[in-house]
Image (cartoon, grey):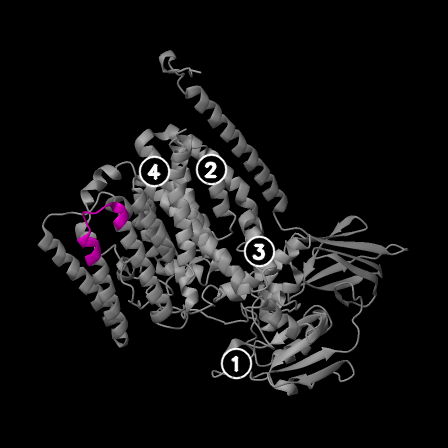
Amino acid sequence: MQHPPALAGRVGPAALLAVAVVATAAIPLAYDRWFYYWDDSAAAFTPGWRVIGQELLDGRWPALVPEMWAGGNVTAEALYGIYNPVLLAAAVVIALIPNLAVGITLVKVFFLAVLAVGTYVLARQFGASRPMAFTAGYAMPFATYTLYFDASSWASGLVAFAWIPHVFWSVRASAHGRINPLWAILFSALALTTGNPYGAVGVVVVYLAVAVELLRLRGVRALTAMVVTGLSALLMSIVVYLPLAFTTGVSVRTATGVTNDGMLRPGLGDVLDLSNPTRLPMIESFGDPFLTMPVGYLAWFVVPLLPWMRWRTLRTSLTAASSLVVFFAVYAVLLLGPSQLWLFRWPLRLLEYAQLPVIVVVAVVLSAGLERDRLRLRFSLTGLLVACQFYTAWSSVPEDLGYHATALGVVAVLTALVLIVRAADARIHAAVFAAGTAAILALQTTLWFPGNYTVTPWFFPRQASFTADRFADRYVGNTFAVADTENIPLDQPRSQWGDLVFGNQWQAAGVDAVNSYAGISYADFVDSLCLNYYGGVQCSDAVARLERTAPGTGVSWIDALRLETIVVQNSGPYGGPRAFDGLSSTDWTVTDGPIVTIARRTTALAFPDGRVSATTTGLDVQDDVTTSATRERLRYSGSGAVTFALLAWPGWSATIDGRPVEVDATPGGLLQIDLPAAAESGSTVDLTYTPPGQSLGVGAAVAGVALALAHSVLWSVRRRRAAPEPRPEAIHTATP
């Protein structure tokens, strides 16, 4: 009869924490309904996941979405996490909800709760009391970097980081034999299959940190089980990264080496500025010498209470917790490193990883209560620390004196309240900590810093039907938008969304646009057409480029891409209606509007059910049919080169009457096949896309699952055999 209360004691606080975080996460929406629909979340992830969700709901596996062109290699992009079951469910949720902002907000709030609960469990594992573990879990999701960059803007970062505390506590508990290793494998695989490289590094650092702890406490033999656990998770997840590795040869993500241009690279003072709610750090960002939010802020109570914490408790509480120290040390080194290290850039992204062990240590120390002696000295030190926070914030941006003064007053009052009740129950302290966290969050997100204006807010329409209704009849077939955000009039920041969008918003609205958000991109293709990462066109002669011959095809880019609609932004340097002077009036109609000029093809394309766009003399294509996003079949006679309106991603393969034939790429990146002489009755070409490395990855995943199950069963058997038999005198027989 003791099991239900014990279970409630373990699960209850975590469930309450999750509910509290979900409720608190709604505070930023009181001022800005776009808060979680910002920057890459609006341009890439939300519409991208919507497309993936729609594909899944239609019964198709979204390995490749050719209509998204440079951004359509969903598998190689990795960040969409199509091998992660939780992210697939999130994509379906976003596809089912008409309001894109609501859909992504629900997904992000869920992961904020996941992060909070993981931090709570991790703090408990290291010895924090329930109230202080609750405090740590409640504070971590609302640390400024996590909230403004990951939760607001870079969704993939939030998804990956949310699993790291769970990886940490489960790997550590499994390594010490306290839980079945299947839990550690599950959480490790969930973090790895998000596709975020920083999450993958986080998993590696966790295993490294726990390995150091095991070596210190139990010796080399103890590492065996943890190595098997890590290997299982790695084998289950390698399928995520192989397509990316095999695609780098054609992508723009080929930068290597070590450089330092200062981009998003924090200084030591920024890292230590843990409790300053208004200091804007002078960190180089996207064209600005400073950030628009206090990115170093973790929790208001950390620095003011430093003189009151019982640090000597660390000698016993963290004696066996060297893994926490190693985890922090690794990230402290990386965080203060150069702006680019190999393929990893912008070390500010690592700030939350370094803050995680800090908030856990604070929770452990606060669990011992606050000091009650030398009151005058401690009050003086606290006052000095709070005053220093005010000075550094004011000296950074003196114009915001009102904000800084308000923050000074709020933090001072909250700190005084904690010290007044310092002898009270820990639950009272936790309530004050939580209330202060919510109050600071409300001030930051509704008054002081309502959005992360270091990056692009976009303010795209939230209702998917808004753009779909305006684009469906106007932008037919393959569409190319000659436009860029730099050309939007400053006094009309949202005036063009009824005619133009950027990133993956095109595809979410049902338009087969060549423009899309491309994380890895296809280098030759985007260079030829002057496309940037969010699908903007940066060359003033863009339409003239389309009219030129696509290298290796013998036809214009317009025909090589099978374009049926071309949209030109009138406010840009592209020429407006005059840009289409070179188009044949018999094949195209041009419509001029206040925002855009639209050219529509009036003659039918050959092979309306296929993607063939060019052939050489001597080759006669008799039939061409696209059977799916990753399959195409054509029949031909004669011989010669055939070009498809497809990008030649690694992974495409072809057979002619069952015999393999080489697949090539034009200088502009289009898929091309040199067809040998056909049989007398004609030959059949079958074109198929399979993510490169998929066979190896799936095989590894199967092996990983088998190894994980075997490891789990072996652990259970050994655990059962090691359990002591109950003594006869300990066995009681119930009396009727």
Distance CA(mark 1)–CA(mark 2)? 51 Å
Q: Earlier in the sequence, mark 4 or mark 2?
A: 2
Residue at the far top in the pictured view: 728
Q: What residue is drawn where x is 21% and y is 39%?
A: 315
Q: Quadrant of the N terminus?
A: top left
Question: Looking at numbered disc 1 in the image, what kind of residue is underneath it?
Answer: Asn
- Looking at the image, tell me whether mark 4 or mark 3 is earlier in sequence order: 3
**Residue appearing at x 28%, y 74% in the figure:** 400
* Position of 437 relative to 511 (above/below): above
Secondary structure under tag 2 reads helix
Chain part drawn in magenta: 416-428
Task: Please give the residue where the numbered disc 1 appears in the rendered image.
Answer: 487
Magenta run includes residue 481: no
- Work out whether residue 338 or residue 97 is closer to the camera in this orientation and state it: 97
Farthest residue to the right: give it: 681
Q: Which of the two discs, 1 and 4, sits closer to the camera?
A: 1
Residue pointed to by mark 4: 212
Badge 4 element: helix
